[in-house]
Image (cartoon, rainbow, N blue to C red):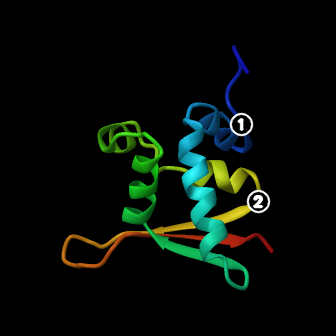
């Protein structure tokens, strides 16, 4: 990839290479546990807690953007939705992973 512009289709794969395995292990575990029908939905705080139990620090999780997995999962066939409250709303942020049709 060196010396050439990145293609949009390559972003997810390149991002994934820079994330620790524990990030994807945590997301994969929750996707498998919550998968019903053709989707899985879980709260952001659940995945952060699971990442921390696997040895990652909260500071690194947020500072290094390790919750920004959408491009990596989209590259392998998922539709990923991240929903967080607006400034005037109060509910937990969630991820939803759906099978691409």
Q: Label 2: which residue?
A: 77
The answer to whether marks 1 and 2 mark residues whose Cβ atoms lie closer than 8 Å is no
Quadrant assignment, res 2: top right
Q: Residue at x 60, y 75 (%)?
A: 34
For the residues labelled 1 and 2, the Cα–Cα distance comes to 17 Å
The residue furthest bottom is 37
Classify residue 3 as left or right of residue 96: right
Quadrant assignment, res 64: top left
The one of 43 and 55 positioned closer to us in this rendering: 55
Q: Secondary structure at mark 2?
A: loop
Residue 86 position, x and y percent, is: 27, 72
Mark 1 vs mark 2: give the one in front: 2
The one of 57 and 94 positioned closer to us in this rendering: 57
Rate crowding at label 1 as few (under 14), some (14 to 19) or many (20 or more) other CA atoms within 10 Å: few
Q: Secondary structure at mark 1?
A: loop
- Residue 7's tag is 1
Q: Residue at x 57, y 65 (%)?
A: 30
The one of 39 and 56 positioned closer to us in this rendering: 56
The residue furthest left is 88
Classify residue 46 as left or right of residue 79: left
The residue furthest top is 3
Q: Residue at x 36, y 37 (%)?
A: 60
Residue 48 position, x and y percent, is: 40, 55
């Amino acid at each position: 990839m060196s010396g050439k512009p990145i293609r949009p289709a390559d972003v997810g794969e390149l991002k994934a290479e820079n994330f620790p395995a524990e990030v994807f292990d945590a997301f994969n575990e929750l996707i498998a546990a919550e998968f019903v029908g053709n989707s899985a939905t879980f709260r952001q705080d659940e995945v952060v807690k699971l990442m921390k139990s696997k040895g990652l620090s909260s500071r690194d999780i947020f500072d290094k953007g390790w919750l920004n997995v959408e491009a990596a999962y989209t590259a392998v066939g998922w539709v990923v939705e991240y929903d967080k409250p607006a400034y005037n709303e109060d509910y937990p942020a969630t991820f939803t992973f759906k099978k691409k049709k």
